[in-house]
Image: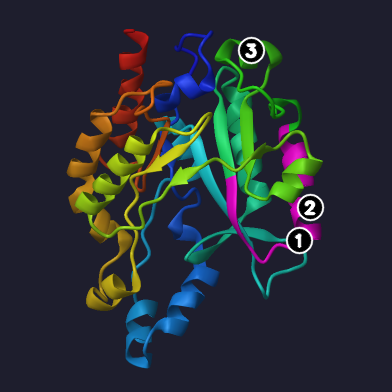
Amino acid sequence: MRDLRGDASVTEFPAKFPPSHVTPSRRHAVTGGGSAQNIRRKTPPKGRAQLESCPKHPVLDVTEQLDAGVRYLDLRVAHMPEGSAQNLHFVHMLYTTLLVEDTLTEISEWLERHPREVVVLACRNFEDLSEDLHEYLVSCIKNIFGDMLCPRGEVPTLRQLWARGQQVLLSYEEDGVVSRHPELWPGIPYWWGNQVSAKKLIRYLERMKGCGRPDGLFVAGINLTENLEYVLAHPAASLKNMTLPSLPRLSAWVREQRPGPGRRCTNIIAGDFVGTGSFVSDVIRLNDKLLAC
């Protein structure tokens, strides 16, 4: 981020935000979240044991992701039904033992060590959060990041962010909460193909590009998605087993993209397993196309 042209809007330097689709490491996964429970309810009894046996896959922890160049973090927050009153965890099929407050603190400490870096944090897909828990989460966000937060309004340039000492654009996918807190930005549109096949996912993304990019920030997700049919047909597999063979094809699609304000341009590109292959460097190098203009 510190090497980029300062007068560019954040929406014009999308590729500098190579993201993680799932922030917390699966090494900390503990039990099924709401999404997993929904799948279990639809699964025949014979298949439930197969679903429970699906191996968990490790990813980089948050500091490792930031060090690798990730600048967009997808934070899916949940309150575990049996959890204590204010302990919030991350969830993506599985709850994690990581507390949201601890991870936000880790991000803040990393930013303090890197004052010219800017991150986009997306709090979304909330599970079992009451109004009080939403307000508690927002109070944690404000206390941890303080003046690092960029209040919503016109999307700033990097130079404006640097001058103000602001390093965090935080989107919050709950409109009522956003309306009460000027430090929060509305949810960022996410192109999610919900596909097992890389070919079908790319077809979906190209169709979305044909409709024209949204104004402001948006995410194109190159993350494949396990569905019930896939889980039952591949009981010993994992999302990693499904994704890794498709990474060359998905990475080739990434390298073909062009960032910027044009109708068919991309902004943030999100993927799984950011520590594998050349994904992060492929996304960052897209900025060269914009700088060459």
Earlier sequence position, callout 1 versus callout 2: 1
- Marks 1 and 2 sit apart, C-alpha to C-alpha, by 8 Å
Q: Residue 43 in the image: x percent, y percent?
A: 39, 84
Q: Indicate whether 272 appears above or below 292.
A: below
Specify which label sits upstream in the sequence, 3 or 2.
Answer: 2
Magenta stretch, overall SS: helix
C-alpha span from label 3 to label 2:
29 Å
Taking 164 as reference, is 196 above or below it?
Answer: below
Q: Nearer the viewer, residue 83 or 121?
A: 121
The disc labelled 3 sits on which kind of residue? Gln
Tell me: 214 left or right of 207. Answer: right
Q: Which residues are magenta?
A: 123-145
Q: Is residue 33 visible?
A: no
Q: Mark 1 sits on what residue?
A: 86
Q: Which mark is residue 160?
A: 3
Image coords of residue 219 (percent x, y): 45, 39
Residue type at mark 1: give it: Gln
Kindly indicate the quadrant of the structure image that contains residue 206. top left
Circles 1 and 2: CB atoms closer than 8 Å: yes
Q: Secondary structure at mark 3?
A: helix
Which quarter of the rendering shows the C terminus?
Answer: top left
Tag 3 near tag 2, CB within 8 Å: no
Secondary structure, mark 2, is: helix
Q: Amino acid at mark 2?
A: Tyr
55 in magenta: no
| Of residues 264 and 35, the one drawn nearer to the viewer in this rendering | 264
Instruction: Give the residue furthest to the bottom.
Output: 45
Residue depicted at x 62% and y 25%: 167
Task: From this view, report whether residue 191 is shown above or below residue 278.
Answer: below
> Which callout, 3 or 1, points at the residue further toward the start of the chain?
1
Which residue is painted at 50% across and 69% down in the image? 35
Question: Which quadrant holds residue 79?
Answer: bottom right
